[in-house]
Image: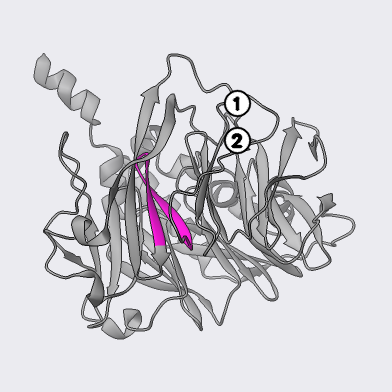
Amino acid sequence: MNHLRIFIPADVLDSYVYFGYLFSVFRDGTLRVLSLHKIYETLVSFHPHFEGILRLAILRNDWLDNSQAGAFFNIRRFRKVLEKAWNDFALNEFTIEFDKDNNWQVLCEVPAMPIYDMRLYATRVYLAHRDGVREGRLFFNDRELRLESPLTKIFDARTVSISARSGSLMFSADNEGLYSGSLWNEQKTTKVSSRSYAKKSLRTGWSSFDVVNYERQSYFSYLENEIKRRKARRPFRYSEIDEYPEKIEIVRIAVKRYSMDEVLKKVPFNYSDVQYCFNSTTACFFFLKDGRFVRVNFARELHTEVRLRSKIHDLSFGTQETFSNNPCSAVAFPLGCVIEYFDRVVLFHDNGVATLEDGPVISVRTFPTSRRFRRQICITREDGIALHAVFPTEDEISRINEPTRVQRMAVAAA
């Protein structure tokens, strides 16, 4: 599998890639940022012949899977040259050190440590910890990045996970329940609801504009939301080069609820067979107690109840030892996922499996809704940060050139 790795030694607890910066919480209680362009320039100074590959891997992942990339990949000779250069670079281990005080810019002190989760969204930073959630608004332009004001507490309950979509945020507060926040009120801070939408929540995932709430690592409930299409773009700020200007507002959370049994009713196994599960926007992934790792797609027919399709895609490929251990965490990635085990991190991508890291890690992050960094994986380890970038497979390249649904409808109507 064509993935390359760049390692940055640092004493950090968590990291996140957003707006061309690496945001990291250091063990000394500071939130610091390092420009990805600084990483790129430093590596290019040592490896000038790989300048193009480094730009694709660090700064512009979108140039690997957008329509322009599709046009270039159609030129088979160009594709082979690019892929060979990528593979040649990936054969090497690249470690690059940056002085904490001279290269990492301090954004602020973190008021409460340790943090349990962090999220960068809509030009804001959210930090979850035992005392609740704090939020800070970011200001950035071509010359500087800073917090506009000190971190503000917006939620009081101990929070273990944060997710965001279309101007709405979900705060998982373990036994305190599940709460939502909205940016559509156009206030300076996120407005958090006083109502809990579930008795327990360890984490949440998004299925289109609906929420999948995980009460246990092996059990979820599906919360169907009410949405409204806005004529104008969303009123709150967002990063135009990193985030998509969605016009969908989630106006009510959990207008309908489905238990895991209801969602699985067409699937030939039940929740008692599951030892761990997670989801992407289009599918659910299950680690089963019999050692299989499977994907089941959501049924998206209009005006029907929420459920999964009956067809199971077995992703074990006869190597069940790879997936048999109970994972610590898992996150979605284009055409696959990244799975964290106690002793390693594994990438499953388009029918292939690769080990990204040997040994335990602190956190694993992907950025599936990002414009520029959706092919990056950011892994925080005890000794630093590993940035991985993944080259598109043959199947992905062929899909780039497939007509969109709108294009197919236009052709059919002609």
Circle 1 residues within 10 Å: few <14, some 14–19, many ≥20: some
Q: Quadrant of residue 387?
A: bottom right
Q: Would residue 246 be seen by someone viewing this image from the given angle?
A: yes
Describe the element under mark 1 as helix, strand or loop.
Answer: loop
Q: Earlier in the sequence, mark 2 or mark 1?
A: 2
Q: Quadrant of residue 230?
A: top left
Describe the element under mark 2 as helix, strand or loop.
Answer: loop
Magenta-drawn segment: 201-214
Point out the image quarter for the N terminus. bottom left
Give the x, y percent position of residue 233: 50, 19
Does the magenta-highlighted stretch encompass residue 241? no
Are the residues at dot 2 and dot 1 in contact (C-beta closer than 8 Å)? yes
Name the residue at 23% across, 37% down: 402
Tell how many labels.
2
Name the residue at 22% across, 24% down: 407
Residue receiving disc 2: 122
